Image (cartoon, grey):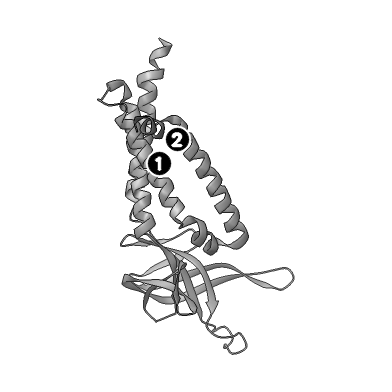
Amino acid sequence: MQTILKFLGSGRFAAILIIFSAIYFMVATAVESSYGPKVAHQLLYKSFIIGVLGTLTAFSLLISVIQRMPFRKKLSGFYLLHLGILVILFGCFITYYLGIDGFITLIPATPNGEVLLPQHPVVEGEATVVDKVSLPFQLELKRFIIEVEAGADGTVTPKEFTSELREPQEVKIFMNHPFKYAGFTFYQSSYFPLAPPEHAQEHHQEYASVLNVNYDPGRFFKYGGSFLLILGMLLHYFMNYKKTRY
C-alpha cells in the first residue's frame, strides 16, 4: 500500500496524467473540429473521464504534499504551487457542475429568460430535445440594429450587428462588447429574420437576436488558484535555485 501511495504522489505518475490529458484533449479538439462542439461536449468534454482525470490529479497532489510533511520552510513555494493547482481544480469542478453555457433568443418587445443548453440534450420518449434553464431575471430586446456594407459588385453584406436591450437595463451588446449582469455574461452571437424577405416590408424587416450566455461560478477560484500557482513558482525559485548561484 505504501508503495502504491508513493507512486501516486510521484512525478512519474504526474507525467503520465499530463501526457494522457494532452492526448485526450487533442482528440477532443479534433472531434470538435470535425463534428462540431455539440458532439465533442457529449462524447468527451462532459464524459466521466474528465472527472476521473481531475480526481486523480487532485489525489496525486494531496499525496505529494503529505509525503513532504512536516512543513519545511524551503518547500513553501512547492506547497503554495500545489495549493494553487488544487484551488484551480476546485473551480473547474464548480464550473463543470454548476456553470451555464448556452443561448438565448430575443424577439423585440418580448421578454425572455430561458437559456437553451445545446450541449445537454434530453431524451423524451423517442425524441431528443434541448435542455434549458431559467435565468433569475428576464431580458427584453428593444431593437436589433444591422449596419451593412455595400460591395463593389453591388452586393450588401452585414458589417456589424447590435442588440439594444430594454431590460434588465438599457445597454447595447455587439461583437467584442459583452454585457455582464448578476454574474452572467451575454455575448452577441447571431441573428435571423422574423419573416421571409418576400413578406417583409422594405426597410422594415425585424430580426431576432441570439446571445451566447455564460455563467461561471468557479471563475473566482480559478483566478485565485492561478495567482497562488504563479506566486508559488516564484517563491520556489527565489528560495531554492537562487541560493545555488551564491
Between 20 and 96, the one lying in front of the other is 20
Q: Residue furthest right?
A: 153
Query: Crowdedness of circle 2 by 10 Å Cα count: few (<14), some, many (20+)?
Result: some
Residue 57's disc is 1
Between 236 and 177, the one lying in front of the other is 236
Q: Is residue 205 above or below residue 211?
A: below
Q: Residue at x 42, y 72 (%)?
A: 131
Amino acid identity at mark 1: Thr
- The answer to whether one can see residue 213 in this image is no
Query: Crowdedness of circle 1 by 10 Å Cα count: few (<14), some, many (20+)?
Result: many
Residue 35 place in picture, x, y as percent: 60, 62
Instruction: Count numbered badges in the picture.
Output: 2
Q: Residue at x 36, y 44 (%)?
A: 88
245 displayed left or right of 221: right
Assess whether mark 2 and mark 1 are in contact (beta carbons under 8 angstroms): yes
Residue 179 place in picture, x, y as percent: 39, 62
Between 122 and 157, the one lying in front of the other is 122
Q: State the image quarter where residue 134 is shown.
A: bottom left
Q: Is residue 18 above or below residue 161?
A: above
Q: Residue at x 43, y 12 (%)?
A: 245
Q: Residue at x 34, y 27 (%)?
A: 77
